Every structure is written in C-alpha cells, then in structure tokens.
Amino acid sequence: MHGGAPFKIALFADLHFGEDTWTAWGPRQDLNSARVMSSVLDQEQPDFVIYLGDVITANNVVVKNASLYWDKALSPTRNRGIPWSTIFGNHDDAPFEWPIEWFSQSGIPQIHCPDTNSPFPGCEECGFRGTTRLELMKNEIERNSLSYSKKGPKNLWPSVSNYVLKLSSSDDSQKAMIFMYFFDSGGGSYPKVISDSQVKWFQRKSKEVNPHARMPEIIFWHIPSEAYKTVAPKFETTSKHYCVGSIFSEDVAAQEGEMGIMKVLEERPSVKAVFVGHNHGLDWCCPYTKKLLWLCFARHSGYGGYGNWDRGARIIEINERPFSLKSWITMEDGHLHSEVLLSS
Amino acid sequence: MHGGAPFKIALFADLHFGEDTWTAWGPRQDLNSARVMSSVLDQEQPDFVIYLGDVITANNVVVKNASLYWDKALSPTRNRGIPWSTIFGNHDDAPFEWPIEWFSQSGIPQIHCPDTNSPFPGCEECGFRGTTRLELMKNEIERNSLSYSKKGPKNLWPSVSNYVLKLSSSDDSQKAMIFMYFFDSGGGSYPKVISDSQVKWFQRKSKEVNPHARMPEIIFWHIPSEAYKTVAPKFETTSKHYCVGSIFSEDVAAQEGEMGIMKVLEERPSVKAVFVGHNHGLDWCCPYTKKLLWLCFARHSGYGGYGNWDRGARIIEINERPFSLKSWITMEDGHLHSEVLLSS
C-alpha cells in the first residue's frame, strides 16, 4: 500500500450480516448496514477500510456457505474501488443456534435464499454448521483483488486473521510510514483469546520489519483485552477526563484470558493504539498506563447485533510529516464527534 | 427381532468415549468403560443392548471422524455377537471445546491417534469440529450387521435417532410381543428437546403398527423430560416410597422444552415405561401420574463424563406369557439391586 498524506482509514465494526434470514426483519438490517457503510464511505472517502470482526452472525446463518453474507458486507467498499482488510470476531464462525420455537408446532420456517445470482455454492441447501474461518478467508481473498486480508501463519491456527500491512511513505515506497497489525482475538469456534503463539509471532515479526521500533505501529483486533477494563471510564480509579468518546453504556466484555500481548505492546514505544469492536455500547479511546498507548473502541456500524445506539464508524487519519495519528467518529447521518489525537 | 421369553436387554448409558485423548487419563477411561460393558454382558448375557446416548464426548474429540470412538464403544457388544441399537445424547455431536490452556505457553498438545488400524479415515488429521449425527449413524449402520439403529425419517431432522423396533412373539414372528420406541432428545448441535414433529411421528407410527394399543410399548431417549422433575424423590410433594433406585444425588437435568410427548405417552395405556440417561447421579424408577407409566433412569455405565458413582447398567427383562416387564441394575462388580416390576 502506498500512503500519501493524510491517509484515511474507516473502521466498520460489528456489522452482523445474515441475521434471521427467515424473517423480513433480518434482510432489512443488512440493507440498513450497507446504507451506513455507503454513507460513511461517500462522506469520508477513505483510502482504506478495515472490517473489525463480527462481519456476519454465523450463529444465525442457515445456508451452507456463510461467505454469501460476508461478501455482501464487503460490497459497499468493493463497489467504490476502495481496498480493505478483515479480521474475525467471535460471531464469524460461531456454530448455528437453533431457535427452540422451531421444534414446536410452528416447525422450521421456510428458508429463502438471500439472492439467486450469488457467486457462492451452497445457497440452495441449508448447512446449519457455519463456515470455518479458513473457508471464509479463502473465499474472500480468492475473489477480491482489493482485499489485503491474509490467512496468517499456519502455526497460529485456530486463529486465522493474523498479519501485518505496511503503509508506505509517499516519498519512498520501500520505506514504511506506519505498520498495521491485525490479530484474530478468537471466539466462536474456540476461546476468546490472543494466544502465546500470537504474542511470539508479533515479537518476531515486529523485530523483523521494524527492528528499531522507529516507525509507528497500530493494532487491530475484535475483542477488548482485560486491559480495557482497567481504563474504562466507568471505574472510579481512572480519570474519565482523559478518555474521549460518546457512549459509555456497558461494561467491557473482555477476552477470556491474557497470554501476554498487552505486556509486549505496552513495552514497545512504537505501538500507538489498539482498536477493537465487540462492545456495541462503547466508542471511547482511553490512554493506557503512563506510556502513550491508546486503547480505542470502534463504533457499532451494523444494524445486526444487539443495541440501538446510532450507527457510525471510527475514522483514523495518518499524517506522515510531521507524523500524527488522529481519530474521530463519523455517524450515519454525517455528524462527526469524539475527535482525539493519538500521537503527540 | 425374535423374542423368546424372557428377553433381556442391557442399557449402556453415558459411556462418554474419546475424552482427553491427549492425556494418559482419557484413553484409560475408555478401557475402563469397555471393562464395565464386558463384565455386565458376560454376567447377564442379554439378548439385546441399547446404547442410551452420550456414547462419546464429541466436545473432546479432536480427530476428524468421531466414529472412531463411537465404534470402540460398540465393540464389547459386537465382539459377543449381540445385536444392539443406539440413540443420541447431547454430547455425541457437540462441537469441540478448546481448552484455554492450549493458548498459553504450553501450546496445543501433540495429538496421538487412538489406534493405527482404525477402520475410519481422518485419524491422522485433527478436525476439531465433531461429526454430525447423520455421519455417526451412517458409519455405524453401514459397517455393522448387528446394528438395529436407524436414521429415522428425514422430516424429523435435525433429530436423527427416531425409530421403532418390534420384538416378535416366540410363537409367531409376525406378531409383536412389545414395541420399543427410540427418540433423539437433542442437545449438542441443537436444543435439548423432543419436537412437535417427533410427537406427531410417534402418534402416526404407533397408530400404524399397534392400532388398538394392544401390545405394550417402551420408550427410550437420552435427556429426561420435565415430567421427571415432578416425580423426582427429592421433592416433598412426591412419595419416595413408590420410587425404586439407589442414587438420588442430583437434580433432574431436564430438556429445554416440552412439546407434547409426555401428554401423548401418558394418554396411551400401552406405554409402560420411559428410560433415559443423562443424569449420572440418578438411577431411579418412579411412577408417573395415576396411570401405570414408569419414568426410569438408566445407570451411568461409563468412566467418561462427570461423577464417580460406581458404574453399572440397567437391565430390562420382558416375559411374554404372562406378560411382565421387570428391571434391575447390575453393577460392574456383579452386584444386583433396585429390582422393580414395571408391569402389573
């Protein structure tokens, strides 16, 4: 990727495509979510889009190949020729959850195919098993030249979306302006966790591509780590006035374990910020410890998933010279708020 | 099947084969469970065996084809040339549950194949996804001439093990001595429930094969229905002295919903008893309502699964003339107890 300055990124978090497709409500939510993305993309004209997990709600997906919905979620970005990358959330490969009502007199409802000219097989039949992370990623990468997603090293399996993207300097495409690290924070078919192997992978990789930690690094995954709890403005021990955001409506729903990633990130001065989704009722950025590492939530972008907070997207703007990392939230209706400087 | 009198059936419940195969503990439990079955079979010499669900613990099964463990559980019966049938429990197709420790420094342990001369493919690789009910049943039926299991009508899917077996009179193989109904009570990949469609299937089927309810009928499924709670001896409102059993150590862990099966069974005078597993800490039979319908637990037969109550098996003995239905529990060490007459 080549980054002129400023380089703008839009984060789409928790779109939850493919819910309740046996009702009229479900497909309508997908149209609404697509409208949110279109609106943000047209207003902000970002250079890059990051799908921050829970792209689909696999526990609702009856068709054999959930890539059908995954692909729908990508289409507003693809239609505008904007490159993107994706990571997995806990809903993306969750096993199908049968509603108990389907076992009563009403029975299993008739399942309608989402569209007839789908590029994916398995629309005609129901799978009720979800689609694996590897399949979802394979289907995305193979069919989309605009996708910068990667499957990640095999030894990190069952976590899949682990990779690094280099944003190049505008002067010299060999030189990096910033590195973006993507992690699979689990959930769905396996625990919500960033593993020790992923930590080691980050240490190895960052040493290799940015040996002296000269260039800045930003981090993306889906489920907040425990560290988010310690800075959450709800708690008395932290100072809310350092945090920037507009919704503080939930407790942080953190990962199930902490295998060391936060310690490594904290100790690496080049790491400027971590961006997560998962909590639809939180959209804040708070500083973590003394060092200037920011912990940020994205903004619930989808009409799928729980919560009725207004939809929007977090925007990240990177300036090369002088280096700055700025972020704000753009709402579906065009309103901007919660601007914060993540570098200084 | 042809039933001379008396006809003896052994129920093996909750064997839970295939647990923790990456440790020495797991495979040892399977050997212990096989020893329980061998001991009971050699002592009781039953004419038929019923595997009452939770034959395997699929949420622990890493190999691609869980039939490998399913098959191991069948082998003591098959080796003695005794015919059998199986039904599904909530653990048989449960999705794999990753231990969170596997994401720490210790990593994913090396997985060993259970045996090298396995008849099933997929031993070499790990699947971590479980095996569907349909696959498990298909693999059992195709490879075993002694198996009387059936896949059941397709319209009852996702519940699979729904079928009826006729035990013939010793005089006339056309004439029935008793009908045995098998139900899939769900759990694992879908809710723990007997559906309205299964109820209708029973009504249709029983009317077809035993139109005037002249011949007795007995019922088998895995998870106790809510009705078991109402007769459970723990509760003051019921009279424990009508119940027969030796362990009353748990609350009844019932199905998630009641779609009508109990009402239908209760109203049909030919239905003598229901047999379930699931609760390892319960082995009683109690009468249900005024009518002589008995609700019985089997006895935990496996070393897999929770609980350390001594292992055993419920035996059912059917006499044709005069008709009688008797049951008792035979322990691993040969001790018999809890004899109860389920007909009168």
Image: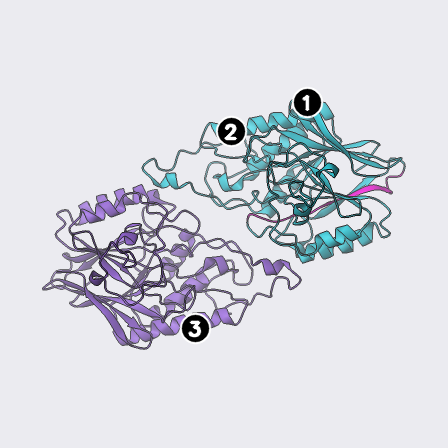
Chain colours: A cyan, B purple
Q: Is residue A115 visible?
A: no
**On the image, numbered disc 1 is attached to which residue?**
A334
The residue type indicated by label 3 comes to Leu
| Co-location on one chain, circles 2 and 3 | no
Residue A27: image tag: 2
Looking at the rendering, the stretch of residues picked out in magenta corresponds to A172-188
Pointer 1 and pointer 2 on the same chain: yes
Q: How far apart are labels 1 and 2 at the CA level?
A: 24 Å
Crowding at mark 3 (Cα within 10 Å: few <14, some 14-19, many 20+): some
Q: Secondary structure at mark 1?
A: loop
Examine the structure image and report whether residue B205 is included in the region drawn in magenta: no
The quadrant holding residue A258 is bottom right
What amino acid is at disc 2?
Answer: Pro
| Residue A175 painted magenta | yes
Give how far across and how far down residue B226 sits, in percent: 31, 50
Q: Chain of mark 2?
A: A
Q: Is residue A99 something one can see in this rendering?
A: yes
Residue at mark 1 to residue at mark 3: CA–CA distance: 66 Å
Question: Pointer 2: residues within 10 angstroms few (<14), some, or many (20+)?
Answer: some
Instruction: Name the residue at 50% across, 46% down.
Output: A95
Q: Amino acid at mark 1?
A: Gly
